[in-house]
Image (cartoon, rainbow, N blue to C red):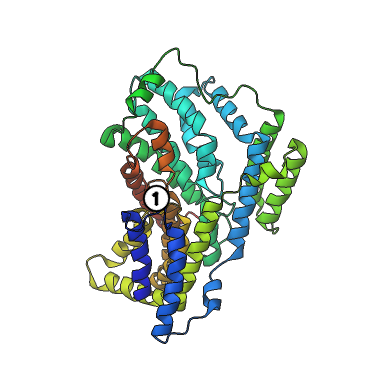
Amino acid sequence: MIGLLVFFGVIIASLRGWIPQHILPVQSALILSSFGLAIIALVFGKPFSLVDVTANIFLHPITALIAGFLVAGALEAAGAFKAAIKILERLAKTPLGLSGTVVVLVNMPTIFAMPCGRILAAALMPAALLFSYEMAKISKDPVVMSMIIFGFIVNAAASCGPSLLGGIGTIGEGMGGYPIGSFSNVQQISIMLITAVCMLTIKYVFRIIPNESIVMSALKTDRKPEGSVENVPKEGYFAFFSFLITIALVVIFKPHIPIQTILIGFVAIIMFISKVSIKDLIAGVILHPIMAMLSGFIIAGSLVAIGSFDTLMEILLFLAKNTPLGFVGVVVILANLPTILPMPCGRIIAMALLPGVLLFGLKISEVTGYEWATPIILISFILNAAASCGPSPLGGIGGIGEGNLGTAIGASGKPQQVAIMIGTGVAALLVSIFHFL
C-alpha cells in the first residue's frame, strides 16, 4: 500500500507542480522513489531483490525503440519527411483537394507510425501549419487552424501505441503473449476517431483561437507559404516508400526474424543509397522516451518486489465487487488512468502499471469467464497511455502546437482528453463486439 501511495504521490505531485520539473523531472523522481521503496521494504522486513526489479526491464522493447529511432534518423537524413510534405502538397492539387489532404495529413502519424509521436510532430509541423493557414483563409475561421494543428498533435501523440518500432502496444502484446501487431489495427481505427472528435470539439465546444498576430499573418492573401519544400532528392522518396513497404511486409508476412534485425538492415540500405552519415543517424535518437520507459520499468519492478501489485489487485477487486462501479466501472477508470494523470511520455505510466493491468485483466477473465476481458483492458489502457502525452502539462507534445499557435499553455488539454476517452471506449467495443485482433 505504501508503495502505491508513493508511486501515485510522485505522479500527482509532478502534475500539480509540487515537484518542480526543472529541478526534478518525473522520471528522476520515480527512480529515486524506487530507492525509497527498497528502504521501506527493509524497514518492514520485506525481501527486496534487485532481480525482482531488473526482471521487469524487458530488453526487447528497448532495443526495438532504439532501432526505431535509428530508422527515424535515417529517414530524416535521407529527406523522407520532406518527401512526405511534398507529396501532401501535390495531393492538394488532385481531386482529393485541400480538405481531403488535411484528412491525410492529420492521420499521417498513425499511418506512418514512429516509435515516438514527437518525431513526426516535429517533422511534419511545417506542413500542418501550412495547410492550417490555407484552410483558415478559405473558411475565414481562425479556429480551423487549431482544429488541424491539435488534431495532428493528438494523432501523433497516440501513434506510438500501434507502432511496430518499439511502440507501447508491442510491449503489451509481448506481456500478454499476443502476436506482434495484433493490437495495432484496433488502435489505428480508434486514433482516427480520437483525431476527428478532438477537431470537432475544438470547433464546436472549446473554440481555441490562435494568437491574434498569428491569425492576421495566416489570413494575409499574399502570404508566402512557409514550410513548403522546393526540391526533394530522389533518395527522399525512395526512403519514404521503402519504409512503408518494409513495415507492410512485416505486418503481412510476420517473419520469424526479429523486427530489430529487419530495421537495422533497412537503415544500412538507406545509409548506403542516400549517403547518410553516422552523425545524422544518431541525431534522430531521442533519449526522452527511452528514459521514460526505463524509469517506468524500474518503478514497476520495485512495486512488484514489495507486493504493491497484490495490494492493487485487492483494491480493484474490492471496488468491482462491493461498489456501484462494478467490474465495468473499475475497468473504465483503470483504462483512462493515463489520461487522468497525463505524463510527458505515455511510457512512464504504461511501463509502471502494465503488469498490474495485465494481472487485473486475467483476474476478470477468470472471475467472469469472459476470455476477451484481458485484451480489452490491455488495448484500452495502452491506447490511452500512448495518447496521454498530448494533453500532458509536463512537456507533452500538445505544447508544440500551443507554441506554434501562441495559445495559452494547456489550452489543448481538454479537447484531447475528451477525444482520447471516447476513443478508448470505442477501442474496447471493437474488441468486445467484433473480437478485432
User: Which class describes the residues within 10 Å of circle 1: few (<14), some (14-19), or many (20+)?
Assistant: many
Residue 408, quarter of the rendered image: top left
Q: Quadrant of the N terminus?
A: bottom left
Residue farthest left in this picture:
324
Viewer-proximal residue among 301 and 113:
301
The residue located at (64%, 35%) in the rendering is 80
Mark 1 residue type: Leu
Task: In the rendered view, tell whether residue 224 sits above or below residue 242.
Answer: above
Viewer-proximal residue among 150 and 282:
282
In the figure, is residue 315 to the left or right of 74?
left
Residue farthest bottom in this picture:
45
Task: In the rendered view, tell whether residue 406 sits above or below residue 53.
Answer: above
In the figure, is residue 250 to the left or right of 320?
right
Which residue is tagged 1? 394
Viewer-proximal residue among 186 and 215:
215
State the SS at label 1: loop
The residue located at (65%, 54%) in the rendering is 254
The residue located at (38%, 73%) in the rendering is 3
Residue farthest right in this picture:
272
* Residue 64 seen in the figure: yes
Percent coordinates x, y for residue 334 in the rendering: 35, 62
Residue 149, quarter of the rendered image: top left
Viewer-proximal residue among 333 and 280:
280
Percent coordinates x, y for residue 195 in the rendering: 41, 40
- Number of marks in the rendered image: 1
In the figure, is residue 416 to the left or right of 434?
left
The residue located at (57%, 23%) in the rendering is 90
* Residue 313 seen in the figure: no
Percent coordinates x, y for residue 328 in the rendering: 31, 63
Percent coordinates x, y for residue 264 in the rendering: 71, 51
In the figure, is residue 200 to the left or right of 283?
left
